[in-house]
Amino acid sequence: MKSNQITLTFSSIAENVSIARLLIASIGGQLDLSLNDIEELKVAVSEAVSNAIIHGYKSNPDNIVYLNLEITKDSLIIVVRDKGCGISDVEQAMQPAFSTDPERMGLGFVFMQSFMDELQVDSKLEVGTTVTMKKHLKQTPISSH
Amino acid sequence: MNLEKKIERLTLLLRIDGELDMHTAHTLRQAIDNEIEKRGIRTVILNLQDVQFVDSSGLGVILGRYKKLLPLGGKLKITNVPPHIYKIMELSGLPKIISFYQDEAHAYEEGRGA
């Protein structure tokens, strides 16, 4: 697999979540991932970006979300970063059904964890949150293309 | 996201076309809550046949409508769920709480006879 890197920075508005998904879906297509894998990547990215907008920036549209995709020989690394309020207790935030909002299911991190091979959350109050997700890529020695 | 609405007595049928994420969740919530509050709708049927994507924001709105209808003696029913959407829903535990039907006819049928 050729290594590749893409960075997308965008305003913290809800409309941009689908653009982040489009990007990961086309990268998934380039990597010849299965439709199911691509679907899962889309959910993971959607959750991370939604969290950045809703929680990191408290839905204030005047901020920037940073999405970085890196393809290495054996993995796809997705980094979603905000310079928002940060999470006071990362461990608690990652618990299933933990939500600060009763309308939400508290499943964001559960989905990220289930659909990615590795998940790391670094957060600092008033500095921001960085979510790093990794998907291992299968080595395909012979390409049919 | 496009919503096709059909109202029959106290039942609201919504055919949802598009992606259910934090952006569209708001529209769906308002569309359903308006009918519950203004028309006294008590059964909401969501046909998800043409839903291409759902994440926890979308699932949250569905669960939220279920919770809103419950104390009103109402019901939320889901029909025509595409397999890839069902997988996400299953992981969330939603099918343990909310009734799923293969199509609209089955959803209308159940609970009507009495």
Image: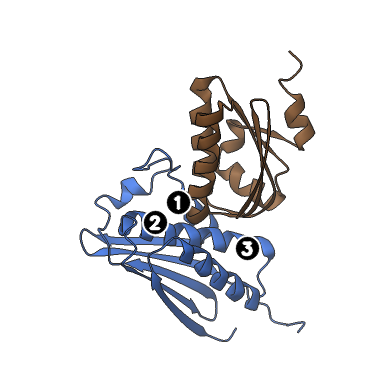
Counting residues from the start of the chain, the first of labels 1 and 3 encountered is 3
Amino acid type of the residue tagged 3 in the rendering: Asp
- Is A144 displayed left or right of A92 in the figure? right
- Is A91 displayed left or right of A75 in the figure? left
Q: Nearer the viewer, residue A18 or B33?
A: B33
Q: Residue at x 50, y 52 (%)?
A: A111
Q: Residue at x 28, y 60 (%)?
A: A123
Say if labels 1 and 2 share a chain.
yes
Judged from the image, the secondary structure of the residue bearing numbered disc 3 is helix
Amino acid type of the residue tagged 2 in the rendering: Asn
Q: Which residue is mark 2?
A: A51
Q: Which residue is mark 1?
A: A108
Q: Most extreme residue toward the front, as rendered?
A: B38
- The image shows residue A68 at horizontal and vertical percentages of 43, 75
Pointer 1 and pointer 2: residues touching (CB < 8 Å)?
Answer: yes
Q: Nearer the viewer, mark 1 or mark 3?
A: 1
Marked residue chain, label 1: A
Amino acid type of the residue tagged 1 in the rendering: Gly
Above or below residue A94? Residue A12 is: below
Where residue A32 sits, quadrant-wise, is bottom right
Q: Colour of chain A?
A: blue
